Amino acid sequence: MQPIVVGTDGSPRAGLAVEWAAEEAGRTGRPLHILNATERWPCDIPFHPAPGLSESLSETSDRILGEAVELALKTRPDIEVTTELVQDTPSEALREAAGGAHELVLGHRGLGGLAALLLGSTGLKVAGHAPGPVIIVRGETGEPQGEVVVGVDRTGESALALRYAFETAAIRGAWVRAVHVWEMPSAATAGAYPAAIRAAAAAAAEGLAGVVAPWRERYPEVRVVEQAPSGHTVGELVERSAHADLLVVGARSNCGGRYGLHLGSVSHGVIHHSRCPVAVVRARL
């Protein structure tokens, strides 16, 4: 059974990620695998590391992993927990681990430095390239709200996001809020074509219903609310995240950008601004 994998660097945000992952492992009946990465010294550096530095880093990693195990078992005493110290760059270690994981869990920010798994840029790189779901734990993670929000744009990425959202809601006993945001034409914004606005709104709602319909049939026990507002996609999703347990979005397959990301503007935006944990879902190769 594929485990829930969580990266930790010992920071407070990493602690929240470990707690979230432990709860997820308990809900799904999967083992939890906790990973810490310590970057190797390059072979071509013009100086030698200080004596004992490698041992010191390993001891620190062992302590971080031990504390993470303690926290995970305190959160869910019923789960199986394993750990791993990886000698690699954080982003490479996490991407490699994602290949054998049911889902990969990260905190939004970390400590920085050689053992950091959770830097903003590292998290974005991983979310943009790792196969399968990557959960960025941010916002409030307190009492369950019983709601999973999923962004829908009627593409292949949305199909993956919808599948994950419905699976997650079914396991949690939650309901799904499927949101498709459409952009109003500039002329219509001025009020020149009210009939065109109504037609565009109706088309957006109809398209959303068509995309969601197969998942309603597959998960009849999951209550669904469909919303097709006009506006800015990131803003609309972030607003609804305030009352959700999870916000689910798809990752773009062919989108470049800073850090070589393949997230797209929506995924990138909600990772930075969501008020609840974010699941970025991309296809497995």
Image: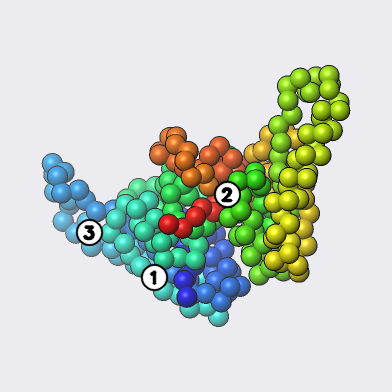
Q: Position of 154 compared to 201: left or right?
A: left
Mark 3 or 1, nearer chain start: 3
Residue 171 rendering spot, x and y as whole percentages? 66, 70
Hey, what amino acid is under mark 2? Gly
| Helix, strand or loop status at disc 3 | helix
Hey, what amino acid is under mark 3? Ser
Mark 2 or 1, nearer chain start: 1
Task: Identify the mark at residue 156; answer none if there is no mark.
Answer: 2
Residue 17 rendering spot, x and y as whole percentages? 52, 59
Hey, what amino acid is under mark 1? Thr
Q: CA distance from mark 3 to mark 1?
A: 19 Å
Which residue is label 3 attached to?
Answer: 54
Q: Position of 159 compared to 194: left or right?
A: left
Q: Nearer the viewer, residue 280 or 15?
A: 280
User: Which residue is at 68% across, 34% downward?
Assistant: 232
Give the foreground label among 2 and 3. Answer: 2
User: Which residue is at 45% across, 65% downward?
Assistant: 101
Q: Is 118 located above or below residue 58 in the figure?
A: above
Give the foreground label among 2 and 1. Answer: 2
| Quadrant occupied by the C terminus | bottom left
Task: Identify the mark at residue 83; answer none if there is no mark.
Answer: 1
| Helix, strand or loop status at disc 1 | strand
Residue 90 rendering spot, x and y as whole percentages? 36, 53
Check disc 3: other Cα within 10 Å, few if <14, some if 14-19, many if 20+: some
Mark 3 and mark 1 residues within 8 Å of each other at the beta carbon: no
Q: Nearer the viewer, residue 56 or 266?
A: 266
Mark 2 and mark 3 residues within 8 Å of each other at the beta carbon: no
